[in-house]
Image (cartoon, helix red, strand yellow):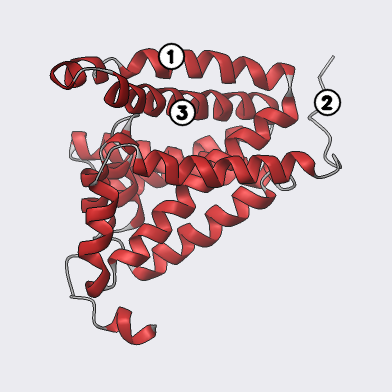
Amino acid sequence: MLSLFAQAPAGPEKNLLEVMTGVFSRPDTLAHPGQILEHLQQMSVIWSLVLLAGGLMCLLSGYKFYKPVTVVLALLIGACVGWAVAQRLHAEQTIVAGCVGALLAATCMPLMKYAVAVMGGLTGAFIGANAWAAITRISVEPDAVTRASEHYWVGALIGLIVFGMLAFILFKLSVVMFTSVSGSTLAVLGAMALLLQVPQWQSSVTKSLSSHTIVLPLLVLVPAMIGLILQEARPDKVEAPAKKG
């Protein structure tokens, strides 16, 4: 197996933030497998393994460690946002990304309940946008697919509101949902990046994932549902943050 990776061509590798910013440049990113594959091909093997391992941990045990998971996700989201903003402003990207990521991560600690609500809302927006894009490509006439899929923001808005409010009503379900979906997404991206590192598999992997826009959403949805079921079935030994009177 190591010899397979050793034969990978020495292409221009990008750091994690640059790749993740490109992958999640739009909410309905799973409906654009070609764009995702293009960015993942430039990710190193080390970061691919980190994404795969971290995603699996979040997928299977996210609720048990929901506080550090929330902080790490906030750090990653903040760093990606800072990286994108610095790129537009032609500023030093590493410094801006680090500052924004550290600020969001530090803010999560004393406001964990609200941080979970925000994570739940963002997860809902992600699910809604990709579900809207996938459904329109299946049910809408071919000549109207592009126009219908451009309204993915409707699904994103619905998901944002529903899942954001869910965090204040069903705390455990909200945490399990966002850890399962985020963990599944990161694990699938890490696995895809690893497969793309093998020259003999690049063509078949690219062809399989690009065959239909429903393939990639299914690859994320199925592990997410498995993680949700497994986490929900475990005894509840974690208490929700206490309300401040």
Mark nearest the camera among 3 and 2 is 3
Disc 3 to disc 2, C-alpha distance: 28 Å
Is residue 3 left or right of 99 when viewed as pictured?
left
Q: Which part of the image, by quadrant, shows the N terminus? A: bottom left
Horizontal and vertical percent position of residue 81: 36, 36
Q: Amino acid at mark 1?
A: Leu
**Alpha-carbon neighbours of circle 2 within 10 Å: few (<14), some, or many (≥20)?**
few
Q: Amino acid at mark 3?
A: Ile
Judged from the image, the secondary structure of the residue bearing numbered disc 2 is: loop
Disc 1 to disc 3, C-alpha distance: 10 Å
Question: Which residue is disc 2 drawn over?
Answer: 242
| Foreground residue among 244 and 46 | 46
Q: Is residue 133 visible?
A: yes
Q: Is residue 109 visible?
A: no
Residue 152, quarter of the rendered image:
top left
Horizontal and vertical percent position of residue 237: 86, 42
Horizontal and vertical percent position of residue 28: 33, 30
Q: What is the number of the mark on residue 157?
A: 1
**Alpha-carbon neighbours of circle 3 within 10 Å: few (<14), some, or many (≥20)?**
many
Going from N to C along the chain, the mark reached first, 1 or 3, is 3
Judged from the image, the secondary structure of the residue bearing numbered disc 3 is: helix
Horizontal and vertical percent position of residue 223: 55, 47
Going from N to C along the chain, the mark reached first, 3 or 2, is 3
Going from N to C along the chain, the mark reached first, 2 or 1, is 1
Q: Amino acid at mark 2?
A: Ala
Q: Which part of the image, by quadrant, shows the C terminus? A: top right
Residue at 18% x, 75% y is: 9
Disc 2 to disc 1, C-alpha distance: 28 Å
